[in-house]
Image (cartoon, grey):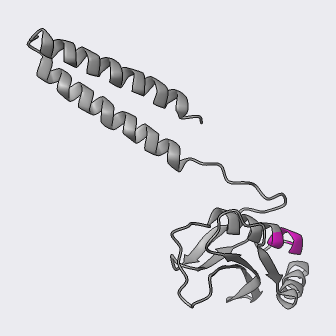
């Protein structure tokens, strides 16, 4: 949705109500103070639409990534995402890149002295009835300081991926 159209027309309406309010004060119309309220409301509405437009930005999509959920985020530099149990190794890699792009923020800080954000992907397997085992499939490492970063380091846990394949086959 393109909010610039709404922002433009809201700004036009705000300017028109401001001009109408000034005219009401010049000609001492009886409803001039009501126009102050209308103009104030339109100003707040226009600023709100502008803020909404800032928050709605497009994130690049990584080809081959699967739907994931964030299950842990310390607000600084550690994130854990959950992926479906049917995921493959290439999908884990693409999903980790997608998560690294999605969750990057200049407001994140390092808590361990390393200027890296660590994103770990996990899934839950059930090796036996009544037993659930978290399986960490890989990690993505990204620097915290720069937004434009193509140097996302992906490390897959091959042992965990083999265990996942065995679980999928069973």
Total of numbered circles in the picture?
0
Q: Position of residue 30 (x, y in %)?
A: 8, 13
Q: Is residue 91 above or below residue 10?
A: below
Q: Name which quarter of the figure residue 49 lies in.
A: top left
User: Which is nearer the eye, 27 or 98?
Assistant: 27
Q: Is residue 89 magenta?
A: yes
- Residue at image position (69%, 69%) is 100
Residue 19 position by quadrant: top left
The stretch drawn in magenta includes residue 46:
no
Depth check: give the residue in front, 125 or 90: 90
Task: Please state if 12 lies on the left or on the right of 27 as rendered.
Answer: right
Residue 1, image x, y percentages: 60, 36
Q: Is residue 86 visible?
A: no
In the image, what residue occupies the spot 77% across and 63% down?
Answer: 66
Q: Residue at x 13, y 18 (%)?
A: 32
Whether residue 41 is visible to the viewer of this picture, yes or no, is yes
Q: Is residue 94 above or below residue 170?
A: above
Front-most of residues 158 and 26: 26
- Considering every residue shown, the one lying at the far top of the view is 27
Q: State whether the magenta stretch is mostly helix, strand or loop.
A: helix
Residue 107: x, y in percent? 51, 69
Which residues lie in the magenta part? 88-93
Quadrant housing residue 70: bottom right
In this view, 48 is above or below 85: above
Check the image and report above or below for 101 versus 154: above
Instruction: Specify the quadrant that holds the C terminus.
Output: bottom right
């Amino acid at each position: 949705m393109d909010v610039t159209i709404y922002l433009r027309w809201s700004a036009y309406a705000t300017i028109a109500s401001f001009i109408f309010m000034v005219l009401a004060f010049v000609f001492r119309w009886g409803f001039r103070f009501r126009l102050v309220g209308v103009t104030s409301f339109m100003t707040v509405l226009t600023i709100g639409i502008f803020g909404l437009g800032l928050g709605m930005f497009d994130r690049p999509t990584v080809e081959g990534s699967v739907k994931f959920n964030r299950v842990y985020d310390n607000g600084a530099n550690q994130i854990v995402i959950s992926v479906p149990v049917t995921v493959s190794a290439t999908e884990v890699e693409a999903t980790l890149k997608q998560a690294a792009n999605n969750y990057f923020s200049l407001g994140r800080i390092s808590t361990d002295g390393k200027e890296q954000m660590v994103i770990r992907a996990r899934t839950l397997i059930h090796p036996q009835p009544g037993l659930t085992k978290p399986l960490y499939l890989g990690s993505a490492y990204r620097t915290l300081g720069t937004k434009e970063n193509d140097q996302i380091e992906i490390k897959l846990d091959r042992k965990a991926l083999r265990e996942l394949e065995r679980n999928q086959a069973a």
